[in-house]
Image (cartoon, helix red, strand yellow):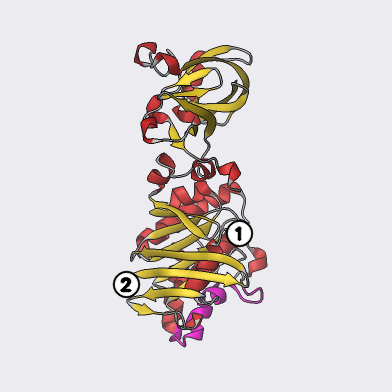
Amino acid sequence: MSKKLVLENVSKHFGSLIAVNNVSLDIMPGEFLCFLGPSGCGKTTILRMITGFEQVTAGNIIYDGKIINDVIPQKREFGIVFQSYALFPNMTVNQNIAFGLKMRKMPQKLIDERVNEMLGLLGLAGWDTHYPSQLSGGQQQRVALGRALAIKPSVLLLDEPLSALDAKIRVRLRTVIKRLQEELGITMIYVTHDQEEALALADRVVIMRDGEFRQIGSPFDIYKEPKTSFIAEFVGTSNFLTCTKKNGKIQFGRLEFVAANSSDVAEETVYLAIRPENIEIVDVTVPADNCVPSNIVEVEVEVINFLGAVVRITFFLEGEEMFVDLPEKEFEKISLKRKDKVKLYFPPDAFHIYTELFRKLI
């Protein structure tokens, strides 16, 4: 049975470099938690501190009510799957999965039962006598998962486990990992810089930047209500408008927009963000009667990219390149071409308002 894992004011310094800066978090039993952030933000360092491969500089890691800062990795009830599969090349699939069980001196009968259970769970039945060199990358990663799960860890930590695989296999293995987590009911802590992966897998996502937690929430909350312009840019795609606020109105070049909640912001320079799928096409996806007139803008279509279920249209607004995403079925109805004129609507409540722009923070 999984137990609660707590990070309490945890920091990690490497000399003068602060890799993780005073972070706190309660990870609930059976939760699927993703740490998401750009390279160098501290997410792998947190994982290594939880497993015991790195010592904390300050703060505590608490598991089942006990501080485990000084407990060696082998004594923690955790499994770990790395980016590199780290399989033993001279051992078969069966022997690789059984490795941790043998180290724990389990009876052979139990080892065989557990290995067969893992082979079945991971769709590897019939591959037990093969060696790693005879397997595809996706199969090797499944074996690494099986080896980590065979010891029945109460917490499984995964460090970018799918990043070396091609896109289709990544999506398939995502489904395998999610299903396993739900079936086994164990706590999974997953590190990735791939926002799509984090949104697809996690119960909660922790957005990291510069060694700090910037936002914690469900994938839905993170996507719909990004707290900073960095998160609006990093998770999904956003169009950014650098605006001036005067007499309660928001000016973008020669245009004037109405934005919900703009009265909450005192600064004169504000940054509006809007997702490409939230921009409407007048009289196609929204009737003109339902629009605030000042938020309707006529633009010229620059580029049309077919992305499968979505068609992305590039246009310029006051010299800024922007995107609008249309469901492919809606696009078919209007058959737009390059250089066509189209009226776009920016709904007031679709804007997020920020007082800083992420590009200045990099």
Q: In this view, does 66 lie above or below 4?
A: below
Q: Foreground: 46 or 58?
A: 58
Task: Quickly name the residue at label 1.
Answer: 40
The label on residue 1 is 2
The label on residue 312 is none
Residues rendered magenta in the picture: 88-108
Q: Foreground: 22 or 344?
A: 22
Q: What element carries label 1?
A: loop
What's the residue type where badge 2 is placed? Met
Q: In this view, does 212 lie to the left or right of 155?
A: right
Which of the 4 image quadrants contains residue 65? Answer: bottom left
Q: In this view, does 255 lie above or below 115?
A: above
The structure residue drawn at horizontal position 39% and vertical position 12%, both measured from the top left corner, is: 288
Q: Is residue 335 left or right of residue 22?
A: right
Q: Is residue 251 above or below residue 9?
A: above
Labels 2 & 1 near each other (Cβ < 8 A): no
Crowding near pointer 1: few (<14 within 10 Å), some, many (20+)?
A: few
N-terminal-most mark, 2 or 1: 2
| Tally of marks | 2
Crowding near pointer 2: few (<14 within 10 Å), some, many (20+)?
A: few
The structure residue drawn at horizontal position 38% and vertical position 17%, both measured from the top left corner, is: 292
106 within the magenta span: yes
Percent across and percent down for residue 187 are: 39, 65
Percent across and percent down for residue 76 are: 44, 79
What's the residue type where badge 1 is placed? Gly
Q: Foreground: 84 or 249?
A: 249
Q: How far apart are marks 2 and 1 (CA)?
A: 33 Å
Q: Is mark 2 on a helix, strand or loop?
A: loop
The structure residue drawn at horizontal position 56% and vertical position 43%, both measured from the top left corner, is: 358
